[in-house]
Image (tube, rainbow, N blue to C red):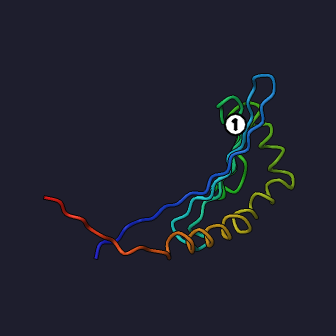
């Protein structure tokens, strides 16, 4: 029997713009199982299409990609923000993964084939 690897993602984007400058965040839950250890939670900030800071649950802290991002990462990793992000993997992703898996993968339709000559 052939085995296959499933990888799903949940993405949520928040966008704010003022005077032509664009700031947005991307939150995602990537998973290949419904178990907590098979889920990766990612939260990133972008400014004018440039990612400047990210939290990944596998790393467990914020990482800055620009000078401003590095300053924010240092501050946020010392504060309550990092604890809140760590908790979101379980409180946000695990709940939604269960809902999506139940609604998408357990409902199947009998396949049909139509042949034409």
Q: Residues within 10 Å of mark 1 (few under 14, many from 20)?
A: some
Image check: 67 left or right of 108? right
Q: Residue furthest left?
A: 117
In which quadrant of the rendered view does residue 2 lie? Answer: bottom left
What percent of the width, then of the height, locates residue 116? 17, 60
In which quadrant of the rendered view does residue 100 lie? Answer: bottom right
Q: Residue furthest right?
A: 79
Q: Which element is circle 1 on?
A: strand
Q: Nearer the viewer, residue 8 or 105?
A: 105
Q: Nearer the viewer, residue 74 or 104?
A: 104
Check the image and report above or below for 103 versus 8. Answer: below
Quadrant for the C terminus, please: bottom left
Give the residue at x 75% y 23%: 20
Image check: 67 left or right of 50? right
Q: Nearer the viewer, residue 35 or 104?
A: 104
Q: Which residue is mark 1?
A: 46
Q: How many marks?
A: 1
What percent of the width, then of the height, locates residue 104? 52, 69
Check the image and report above or below for 25 versus 6. Answer: above
What percent of the width, then of the height, locates residue 71? 80, 37
Check the image and report above or below for 65 versus 12. Answer: above
Give the residue at x 70% y 32%: 66
Q: Residue furthest top?
A: 19
Give the residue at x 56% y 68%: 38
């Amino acid at each position: 029997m052939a085995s296959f690897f499933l990888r799903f993602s949940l993405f949520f984007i928040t966008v704010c713009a003022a005077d032509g400058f664009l700031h947005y965040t991307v939150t995602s839950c990537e998973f290949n199982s419904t178990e907590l250890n098979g889920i990766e939670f990612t939260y990133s900030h972008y400014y004018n299409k440039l990612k400047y800071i990210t939290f990944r649950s596998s790393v467990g802290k914020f990482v800055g990609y620009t000078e401003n991002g590095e300053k924010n990462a240092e501050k946020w990793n010392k504060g309550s923000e990092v604890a809140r992000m760590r908790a979101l993997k379980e409180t946000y992703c695990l709940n939604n993964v269960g809902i999506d898996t139940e609604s998408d993968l357990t409902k199947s339709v009998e396949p049909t084939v139509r042949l034409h000559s």
